[in-house]
Image (cartoon, rainbow, N blue to C red):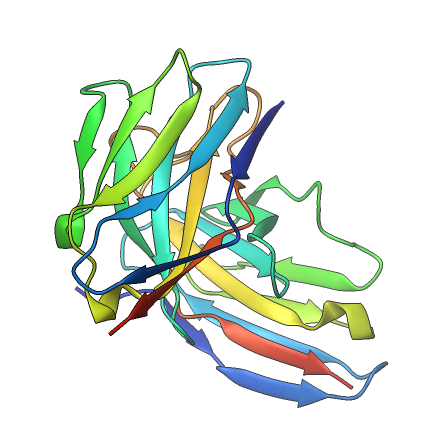
């Protein structure tokens, strides 16, 4: 079974530039998550989709971050304009259903590493 | 609200000796608990999960964890460390009450000395 695919794996940009990350979840998974992992910290949820609808975006900095999942499959996370503190790994994850109860496992991609200089 | 505390930011063991990674949680509800492992430049891989069934949970690669409600702990153990176990380990909680979010600890970096 193919895993969660992310691209690009690595990106270096200057502050105030824009960047976009793409994620393709595991086939059949309705729920898609974007997490931000800053060096030395655990991942933090940015946004969660159920099909093409947003379930939770309470921790997404909406003045600079945006995400969409228009057809309920793959998703794009955009940052514009980038700040130095946005340097992090952006992890995409997917699961069959909502939440992390006994029958629902969340699978993570390998991440997109962003460095803002 | 829930929180996860990983008591050690870095643990170093010799190959072939036991591994103990400590995790405490705080939650208003009975949480589901997980351990994920992250190897360098790789994504997070699920090691094991506790979801209110057996309190001793066995995972992949010989890891296991025991849920102790009285101590609010979910420590990860392995009888004998292997070089390939060197990685970052995250303890994660999920309560499902009002939010679908996973709450991550800050991680424990495990080093294995040959």
Compare residues B85 and A48 and report the one nearer the observer.
Answer: B85
Q: Is residue A66 visible?
A: yes
Residue A107 visible in rendering: no
Q: Is residue B8 above or below residue B49?
A: below
| x and y percentages locating residue B73 in the rendered image | 41, 25
Say which residue appears at 18% left-offset and 20% top-offset. Answer: B54
Q: Tell me the residue at 35%/35% (across/down).
A: B75
Q: Residue at x 64, y 63 (%)?
A: A38
Give the left or right position of residue B28, taking residue A58 as reference.
left
As drawn, B95 above or below B11: above
Residue B10 rendering spot, x and y as whole percentages: 48, 57
Depicted B113 relative to depicted B100: above or below = below
Q: Is residue B105 left or right of residue B48?
A: right
Which quarter of the rendered picture does the N terminus of chain B lie within? top right
Q: Nearer the viewer, residue A11 or B19?
A: B19
**Residue B104, position in %: x, y?**
52, 43
Residue A75's spot in the image, x, y percent? 51, 64
Q: Is residue B67 above or below residue A112?
A: above
Residue at 56 percent across and 49 percent down: it is B106
Placement of the C terminus of chain B among the 4 image quadrants? bottom left
- The one nearer the camera, A38 or A36, is A38
Question: Does residue A100 appear left or right of residue B105 in this picture?
Answer: left
| Number of marks | 0
């Amino acid at each position: 079974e193919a895993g969660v695919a992310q691209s690009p794996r690595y990106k270096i940009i200057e502050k105030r530039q824009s960047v976009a990350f793409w994620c393709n979840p595991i086939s059949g998974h309705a729920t898609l998550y974007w997490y931000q992992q800053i060096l030395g910290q655990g991942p933090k949820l940015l946004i969660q989709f159920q099909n093409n609808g947003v379930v939770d975006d309470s921790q997404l900095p909406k003045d600079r971050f945006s995400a969409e999942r228009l057809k309920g499959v793959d998703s794009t996370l955009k940052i514009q304009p980038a700040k130095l503190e946005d340097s992090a790994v952006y992890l995409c994850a997917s699961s069959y259903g909502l939440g992390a109860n006994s029958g629902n496992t969340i699978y993570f991609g390998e991440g997109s590493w962003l460095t803002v200089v | 609200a829930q929180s996860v505390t990983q008591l050690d930011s870095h643990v170093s063991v010799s190959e072939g000796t036991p591994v103990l990674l400590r995790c405490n949680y705080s939650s208003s509800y009975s949480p589901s608990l997980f351990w994920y492992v992250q190897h360098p430049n790789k994504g997070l891989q699920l090691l094991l999960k506790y979801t209110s069934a057996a309190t001793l949970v066995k995972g992949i690669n010989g890891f296991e964890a025991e849920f102790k409600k009285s101590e609010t702990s979910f420590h990860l153990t392995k009888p004998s460390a292997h070089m390939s176990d060197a990685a970052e380990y995250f303890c994660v909680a999920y309560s499902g009450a009002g939010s679908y979010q996973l709450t991550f600890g800050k991680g424990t970096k495990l080093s294995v000395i040959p």
